[in-house]
Amino acid sequence: VSIRLANKFILTPKGLDTVGKVTHSGEPKMNLVFGDRVYVDFFRSDYKDTVQVGQKFYVIRRIKNVDNPAGGGTIGTLIKKKAVVQVTDIRSSPRNKRKLVFEGVVTDAEESIQRGDRLIPYKPEIRNLVPHFTDTLITGHIAEGDKQQLMISNNDFVFLNIGLKDGVKDGLQLYVVRRGDGIDFGGDKHLPDVPVARVMIVEAWDTVSTAYVVSLDQALVIGDRLTTVVE
């Protein structure tokens, strides 16, 4: 199945480094938009050597830290993908032949970008996934909604507090489960878990992941529990 990651927000693990930033523009204006020419630079010299013409990068804005609903502090940073910059030319500076100049163009702009905005590597937004289940028990929680919404609906994207290190892989489907009716808190621990929705992993990092809500019977909320096996 092919899914387009239309979500404009991503949850990245703690410690994800940006690789560069927007430094200048070919336009005498502060806010740069679709089609504008920009110049970018990269922080590490060894990384610069790997950049090629045609390569894309997300221009991002950090939104907030996301807490683990199961406790234990922050699990990552919520980031907005403001735009995409594609490298169109790489050449030596006329004043310093040892310094590379990276020219690019703003594409797929969700909002205007500014000089100083940071870059992270681009990932293709069309994902070819093989939906599957597993008998191995993996549990987790919904940590945040794609739009920071309170009520999460069908076809929304959600961010989870589990990732590759927990056994999660792209295409894996998990059940969202609840116990009892949500009214008699603490008095329903003896009741079985009941599936109320199903989500599919579309992008897994080491410790967090993005999932797509495939189906649901009730609106979901942050903190809802996930499992691969329903007893």
Image: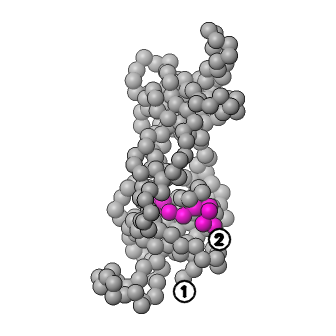
Q: Is residue 194 above or below residue 19?
A: below
Q: Residue at x 48, y 43 (%)?
A: 81
Q: Residue at x 62, y 31 (%)?
A: 44
Rate crowding at label 2 as few (under 14), some (14 to 19) or many (20 or more) other CA atoms within 10 Å.
few
User: Where, quadrant-wise, is the C terminus in this rendering?
Assistant: bottom right
* Marks 1/2: CA–CA distance: 18 Å
Q: Is residue 155 above or below residue 63?
A: below
User: Where, quadrant-wise, is the N terminus in this rendering?
Assistant: bottom right
Looking at the picture, how far across and down is residue 121, in whole percent?
A: 59, 41
Task: Tell me the residue that label 1 is attached to.
Answer: 231
Q: Residue furthest top?
A: 95
Residue range corresponding to the magenta coloring: 158-167
Looking at the picture, how far across and down is residue 133, in whole percent?
A: 63, 74
Under mark 2, the amino acid is His
Q: Nearer the viewer, residue 127 or 77?
A: 77
**Is 201 in the magenta?**
no
Under mark 1, the amino acid is Glu
Q: Residue at x 46, y 46 (%)?
A: 79
Task: Tell me the residue that label 2 is attached to.
Answer: 132
**Is residue 16 visible in this depiction of the protein?**
yes
**Is 166 in the magenta?**
yes
Helix, strand, or loop for circle 1?
loop
Asked which colour scheme the image uses, the reply is one colour
Looking at the picture, how far across and down is residue 131, in whole percent?
A: 63, 67
